[in-house]
Each structure stands twice: as structure tokens, then as C-alpha cells.
């Protein structure tokens, strides 16, 4: 995988409690990866807001920018509480949140976002904005949800596709960094009628189909297990939908990892109902890895 040597972990902030959760998660990620942390606030009037709601009166641009700079300074201080030795920089960047973070992702090892946000990040994980960043960012995206667990495994969705392979590599690196077990989940369903009048396939061998799915899972994990012999791996074949399997496994996870696109059970993971289920119902931080030329950033 491409490691983008020297690239920072980037975190988007807006002054909300969710953004501060993201800052703490990002600081731990940066420290664990021995990378600097870059704190970014997108400055765009008139979509700014406060914890009390939209600004009711027009304030001079200088005062608005001062407020944005205070948000960044507070976030930088919060990051340094996690690790006083961490190299942290912060800046206010003109533009909308999605555009600003898309640009920042070009030179980042990881982009960290809060699950909920106010002001410039309002509704970031509702509707198109989350899909845009998850599917188009030039680095993996990590969505924070409160304070993450200090124990539990790293969970990764497996489907045998190239993007799934990159997600597996990201998950192995994360598990090694945390000293955690890796749970590789392959979700699949037995063939079944699609609609009224449909019938089961004439040739149908459940044991053979299950053996094939087990082979897909084992082969997907094997190469990465050799590269990370220190990581204990548990392979889990689940007869369920991908969303249900991953959401359930996330309950005990430090981190859940998915690919932005795939085939089979995980196909279209970030498009439509499955993406909304995972983004909104995952009980752990969620890392979303999309395909990049040369591989995903570590």
C-alpha cells in the first residue's frame, strides 16, 4: 500500500462536540502512525452556525473569521491533550466543507470526520455529502463516533474484490497499530427466489456454495496475514446481508473497515440503503477505503 510518507492525518472541525470527538480520534491515529495532525476549519458565510442555531444577525467578516480561528485553536489544544509531543497545525480555509476537505485529502494519509456536526458541517453524514467524501476523497475516511473503545477487535468487510483487498490491508495495519485482533467478515446469502413466481435453482448444493465462500474469505486474508504475522486473525462467514453483519460486528469493535465499492454481498456498500445503515448504525468508528492508484494510504 502507498504510505504517503510524511502525509498528515487531517481532521475537519466546526466547534461541535462531534468534531471534538473526531479531533481526539484523529490525534490518536496520528500519534499511532507517527504522523503530524492537520486541523482544518472550512470558512464559508452564510452557512456558519453556532451550537445555539444559525447566526441571527450579520457579523463583520473579521469577527466571523476570529470565531473560526478560535474553533481551530481549541481543537489544536484538545489534540495536544491526547499527546503533548504530537506535531499539530491548524488553519481556517475559505470554502465549503466538502470542497475544502476534498482538497485536503489529496495530501493526507487519513481524513477524520465527526459523525454529527454543526455550522459548516451540518448534515455532513446525511444525504450526498458523506457519500461524496467517502466515495471521492483521495485518502481513506474515518468517521468518529464518540469515544472509541480501547479494547475489542478491528472488523473488516471482505468480498474478494480489489477494493476489498485494500480495505483488508488498511484493517491489518490498524490492527497491528492497536495490538488488536482482526475479524474478517464475509457476508453472503443462500440463493433464494427473487419475486413472486420465481423458483430456486435446479442445481443447488449448499455445502459446495459455503465451501466456495469460505475459500473467497481465506484467500482474501492469506496474503495480508503473511505480511502482518503479529496480528491474530479470525475469519467469520455470516449468512446475512452485509449491512446487518457489519453493524452487528461493530458493537464490540474498536474500528470497522469497509471498502467504498465492491461486488457480491458488499457491492454498492456506500450507495443506497446499505451505506446509510452502516454510516448511521455502526457502533464503532468507521473507516471507509476506496480504490486508489497504487493502493490505499496506510
Image (cartoon, rainbow, N blue to C red):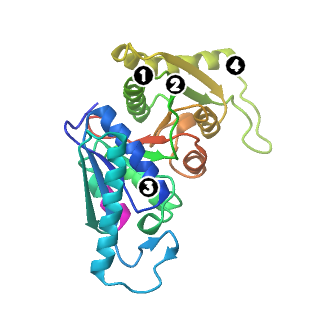
- Choose the circle earlier in sequence order: 1 or 2: 1
Q: Is residue 137 visible?
A: no
Quadrant where the N terminus is found in the figure: top left
Q: Which residues are magenta?
A: 96-102
Q: State the mark number for residue 19.
A: 3
| Residue position for label 2 | 184
- Choose the circle earlier in sequence order: 3 or 4: 3
Between marks 1 and 2, how big is the CA–CA gap?
A: 16 Å
Secondary structure under the numbered disc 4 in the rendered image = helix
278 lies left or right of 33: right
| Residue position for label 4 | 206
Secondary structure under the numbered disc 3 in the rendered image = helix
Q: Position of residue 156 (x, y in %)?
A: 49, 31
- Choose the circle earlier in sequence order: 1 or 3: 3
In this rendering, the answer to whether 205 lies above or below 275 is above
Q: Nearer the viewer, mark 2 or mark 4?
A: 2
Between marks 1 and 4, how big is the CA–CA gap?
A: 37 Å
Q: Residue at x 47, y 38 (%)?
A: 262
Between marks 2 and 3, how big is the CA–CA gap?
A: 29 Å
- Choose the circle earlier in sequence order: 2 or 4: 2
| Residue position for label 1 | 179
Q: Residue at x 45, y 20 (%)?
A: 221
183 lies left or right of 165: right
Is the residue under label 3 in contact with that under label 1 (CB below 8 Å)? no
Number of marks present in the image shown: 4
User: Between residues 24 and 295, which one lies in front from this camera angle?
Assistant: 24
Amino acid at each position: 500500500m502507498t504510505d504517503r510518507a510524511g502525509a498528515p492525518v487531517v481532521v475537519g472541525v466546526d466547534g461541535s462536540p462531534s468534531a471534538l470527538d473526531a479531533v481526539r480520534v484523529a490525534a490518536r491515529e496520528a500519534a499511532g502512525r507517527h504522523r503530524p495532525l492537520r486541523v482544518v476549519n472550512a470558512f464559508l458565510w452564510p452557512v456558519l452556525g453556532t451550537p445555539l442555531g444559525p447566526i441571527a444577525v450579520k457579523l463583520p467578516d473579521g469577527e466571523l473569521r476570529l470565531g473560526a480561528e478560535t474553533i481551530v485553536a481549541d481543537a489544536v489544544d484538545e489534540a495536544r491533550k491526547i499527546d503533548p509531543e504530537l506535531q499539530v497545525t491548524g488553519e481556517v480555509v475559505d470554502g465549503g466543507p466538502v470542497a475544502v476537505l476534498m482538497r485536503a485529502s489529496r495530501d493526507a494519509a487519513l481524513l477524520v470526520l465527526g459523525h454529527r456536526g454543526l455550522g459548516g458541517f451540518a448534515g455532513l453524514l446525511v444525504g450526498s455529502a458523506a457519500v461524496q467524501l467517502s466515495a471521492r476523497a483521495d485518502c481513506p475516511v474515518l468517521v468518529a463516533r464518540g469515544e472509541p473503545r480501547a479494547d475489542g477487535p478491528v472488523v473488516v468487510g471482505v468480498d474478494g474484490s480489489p477494493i476489498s483487498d485494500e480495505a483488508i490491508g488498511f484493517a491489518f495495519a490498524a490492527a497491528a497499530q492497536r495490538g488488536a485482533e482482526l475479524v474478517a467478515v464475509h457476508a453472503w446469502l443462500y440463493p433464494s427466489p427473487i419475486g413472486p413466481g420465481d423458483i430456486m435453482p435446479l442445481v443447488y448444493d449448499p455445502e459446495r456454495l459455503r465451501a466456495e465462500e469460505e475459500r473467497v474469505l481465506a484467500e482474501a486474508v492469506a496474503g495480508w496475514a503473511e505480511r502482518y504475522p503479529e496480528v491474530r486473525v479470525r475469519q467469520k462467514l455470516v449468512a446475512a446481508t452485509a449491512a446487518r453483519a457489519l453493524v452487528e460486528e461493530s458493537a464490540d469493535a474498536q474500528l470497522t473497515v469497509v471498502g467504498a465499492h465492491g461486488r457480491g454481498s458488499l457491492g454498492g456498500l456506500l450507495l443506497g440503503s446499505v451505506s446509510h445503515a452502516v454510516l448511521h448504525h455502526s457502533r464503532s468508528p468507521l473507516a471507509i477505503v476506496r480504490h486508489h492508484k497504487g493502493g490505499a494510504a496506510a
